[in-house]
Image (tube, rainbow, N blue to C red):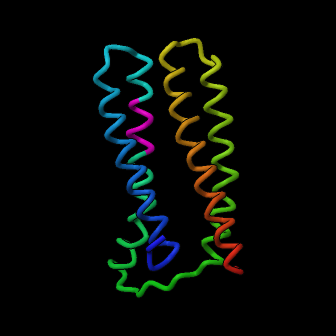
Amino acid sequence: MFFKSIETEIKFILLVWGSCSIIGGATFIYFDNDFMKALGFQFIIWGLIDWIIAIGPSILRSIRKKPHIENLAKLKNNLIINVFFDIVYVVVGSLIFVGIFEIYQYNGHGLGVIIQGSFLVIFNTYYTVKIIQKGQ
């Protein structure tokens, strides 16, 4: 792509995905349907989390007045750990979706976690492989 660093590319994509999730989630909240409201709630929450992950480190660096030094080895390790957490999110979302809880609206929560977790599995795996291919 045309980004100056992998970290910048990751931030951009997380901000776009997070924004789309929040907008979609806000739209789903207005449906007269508990399933869609639950799905929308999950999209909004996960979108906010994506925003925090994308811009949080930059804000902390500016508060601490520390320069940015890209550390691809550390980023790769963080992404690998996150892939395992993301897989857990998908499994838990699947359990919720299939009815571990006997409340209908939870299925929407489950599907929301499955969708958002699946995106993160693919996203984090892709960038882990990309960093490994760069020799880190």
x, y percent for residue 122:
62, 51
Of the pair 130 and 77, the residue shown nearer to us:
130
x, y percent for residue 60:
38, 73
Q: Which residues are magenta?
A: 40-46
Q: 80 above or below 62?
A: above
Main SS category, magenta section: helix
Tell whether 115 sits left or right of 38. right
x, y percent for residue 59:
35, 71
Tell whether 127 sits left or right of 62. right
Please report the residue visible at 49 percent of the width from the left and 70 percent of the height from the top.
1
As drawn, the residue found furthest toward the front would be 1
- Asked if the magenta segment contains residue 10, the reply would be no
Please report the residue visible at 67 percent of the width from the left and 54 percent of the height from the top.
83
Q: 25 above or below 107?
A: below
Q: 106 above or below 63?
A: above
Numbered marks: total? 0
Q: Quadrant of the C terminus?
A: bottom right
Q: 113 above or below 60?
A: above
Question: Based on the displayed image, in which of its 4 quarters is residue 35 positioned?
Answer: top left
Please report the residue visible at 44 percent of the width from the left and 53 percent of the height from the top.
50
Tell whether 56 sits left or right of 97. left
x, y percent for residue 4:
45, 79
